[in-house]
Amino acid sequence: MVDAAPVLEVIGLTKDFAMRRDSRAQRAERQAGIGLLGRRLASKSTSTVTAVDDVSFAVLPGRSLAIVGESGSGKTTVARMIVGLERPTTGRIIVSERERSGRHVGSRERKRRAREAQIIFQDPYSSLDPRMTIRRCIAEVLKLHFDQSEQERNDRIDQLIDQVGLDLRHGDVLPRALSGGQRQRVAIARALASEPRVLICDEAVASLDVSIQAQVLNLLSDIRDQTGVSYLFISHDLAVVRQVSDDVIVMRSGRVVERGPTEVVLQTPEKPYTKRLLAAIPREGWRPTASRDADLEDEN
Amino acid sequence: MTIVATPAATRTARRWLPSRSSVLRDPVVVVTSLFIFLLVCVAVFAPWIAPHDPNYANILAVNQGPSAAHWLGTDSFGQDLASRLFYGARLSLLGPALIIVIATTLGTVLAIAAAWFGGAFDQAVSRVADILFAFPGLILAMLAVAMFGPGLIAPVIALSISYTPYLMRVIRSEAVRQRNLPYVAACYVEGLPARTICRRHLLPNVAPLLLVQATLSFGYALVDLAAVSYLGLGVQPPTAEWGLMVSTGQSSILAGYPEQSLYAGAMIILTVVAFNLLGDRLAIRRGVDRV
Amino acid sequence: MNVLSIDGLSVDLPGPEGPRRVLYDVTLDVAEGEAVGLAGESGAGKSMTARAVIRLLPRGAVTSGDIVVNGASVLAMGTVALRNYRMRDVAMIFQDPRAAINPVRRIGDFLVEALVERGDPEAKALEIVTGLLESVGIKDVSRRLRQYPHELSGGLLQRVMIAAALAIEPKLLLADEPTTALDVTTQSDVMVNLDTQRRERGLAMIFVTHDLELASAVCDRIAVMYAGFLVEDSPAEGLHHAALHPYTAALLASRPSVAARERRLVAIPGRPLSPFEVGEGCSFAPRCPFAQDRCRVERPILRKVGVGRVACHRTEELQGQLDADQMRANVHG
């Protein structure tokens, strides 16, 4: 195998959120009657939550990495940090062999970064501007990044619409006329318009019906074959992860618990958390099993 | 949740108005819009359609009832009421229009900026708005008149400043909501400059709310300005203006001639009601129209 | 003896251009102690059916057909009878526990409320409720009772809702996607709980879900819905390898598997139809890989086939082909 440089690399990524309001624990404490006298004043307003704790991974060109975790695992925060929607507390993000600093970046640099990594969000119903037709939506991206004649641009829009399996007629409608699955296809087309090297799918199929999910997963697979784009797939659904990714990392409470090739990790998991995740997936012949006490969920 | 994708659904994007078909089918919207349109026509074409010079006082024709010469009769100075109402429409509509335009523009710019930048800027703008909120519009108007003299300009500016915080607050909350939606994040990640996102995406999506709020506020602005005129702080007699007419007609009421105050008052009420109803219906439609 | 008998239920909802049908002639029985899964994709009508059973339909809904619970017709009940019915005979667990509970009242108050309304003295109600919370696996019950909903996690709150449903000792439980909003590990725990409690008390249940595998695991029978029609009603075990309806098989086959990656997933073309978009003939015909001319013009009626019921013209012919695993394999050619 050719030892190519990773298209996306993350080293020691950490994100702390300062909680200005009381956390659930503090409120609960108060409820139980500990009161002002029993609490140190310092703890009132400076609790921090570490959403992402020292996470590192790399995605090689043309490969697909999945980040698996349940709610609160920090997987979405990682995705948001990579595309610049959150600023990391510490750590390095390297996309297309260029460092992304934690400092605020101007729109010029942001525009350049748009050609490296793009993101598709979970909710198809709010990830498109409701007042823009599909064509305008894609055209906006093309106009921003490419110097094309109007004809060239229109052809490219047609090409993208077709590539995501939509009818050209759909180009002239508003998002409200499209179903969830169709809107998600538009989101994919828009993301592909800037020709990124890596596409981040943040629970991109989680809100879709099962039969539509299958269509979109097939589509993503086709796009990978056609364009060679790499995927960073964020999901809580292990079956989807098995289907789309070559490698996987399992996150829990902000940390990486296990990592490796998808086949290996899902076939022969080593860590107890991974095993528990696998055991909880409904499949043929499966029966639900209790894995822990109810109160342990409520880890305050 | 299933949204229908009918192949024939080619809705062209209406960028500023709620979807045409649903709004225009509403009888209330039709009637109030028509009324407002007529009012505006009357105001614009007053010099051509008014039967008399509104300020011409014919002392021989004081306090007359309706006749062929004077459609609505005359007031205590012998001025033609109908003409005064027509000409009055000009100032009575212009004043609030100016207030709304200024307050909406200012409010929207601040709202979107506050929503986009967040943090300290947002806090600062919101707190200033809160402070301004504490001042009743009329008091500010009276203060302005005390400083700059009576007329249209001072109260209009004062009231514009007074209305801005409310509009800013309302638009800001929607702008913040829109800003937190994934499509804005998508634009950001696509590399669009901030001002483009605000102009091309945030603004059109708060526009429906803006339109509703502007329409509703127009009525309030009209009443406030009429009150200012009523108090003698706005335009001065003999200028025709509805609020002023209500005031100067007061003495005639006791004499048994309530027409001047009544007609002027009625115009104010009808106009305010029209705007309020229209604004209200647009608000309902906007709720229905949401994606 | 059937706890629940839905007989030819059709529901129309008011639409912008006249009434729209959302349920077409649904007929379903649930026996005592039986768990029936109501499965399908969005818009299929499964939630609507469950809500019809407790008569929680949207304003303006027009129903025809009947729903009989323990001999009484739900659709014909007067206000008092309906209230008693909802307080004693049937209980519903909703998808989002946070939307189903009053956020400004304590958990204890919420749980005790229904029992006190029914006439139980408060002390006794508290006792029952404490016992229930323990049985759904909650520790430190007295503390939890004093807490507010926002202090509990989603999984914990859903257990509270289950306890609330069980508190009134209903004959029938309606669970509308109770675990969809929960993490998969939490889902597993909550399902164990629900299942255990249900079996212990011999309660009948309708379990609405989009997850066919989950339904198969906890239900005795699965009723599959599509575009407002009930298309299949079969025992849970047989579903994976011998479904009666092509939609069921295709749905099972289109799900990716943790065990292996497919070259390509079985993808039913098109999208799930809304009930009011259905034309002549079988609702699934436009998307069905086995559709024939007859299917496009003649609407199949739900009929008995072996141990189940199905609404398909070609079930007998297709026997052996409606195996989810085989359909997966066929995609590779």
Image (spheres, coloured by chain):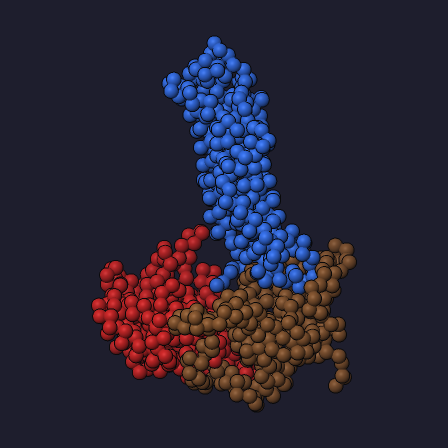
Please determine whether, in this image, residue B267 is positioned above or below residue A211.
above
Q: Which chain is red?
A: C
Please tell me the colour of chain B: blue
Image quadrant in which you'd find residue B162: top right
Image quadrant in which you'd find residue A8: bottom right
Residue A108 visible, this angle: yes
Q: Residue at horizontal 45%, vertical 20%?
A: B72
Q: Quadrant of the C terminus of chain C?
A: bottom right
Residue C307 in picture, x, y percent from top left:
36, 81
Q: Which chain is brown?
A: A
Residue B225 in picture, x, y percent from top left:
51, 33
Residue C6 visible, this angle: no
Near-viewer residue (A300 or C222): A300
On screen, residue B224 versus residue C8, left or right, reads right
Q: Residue at horizontal 54%, vertical 85%?
A: A274
Q: Quadrant of the N terminus of chain C?
A: bottom left
Near-viewer residue (B201 or B146): B146
Please determine whether, in this image, residue B77 is positioned above or below residue B145.
above
Please identify the residue farthest to the top as the structure is shown: B60
Q: Residue at horizontal 53%, vertical 66%?
A: A20
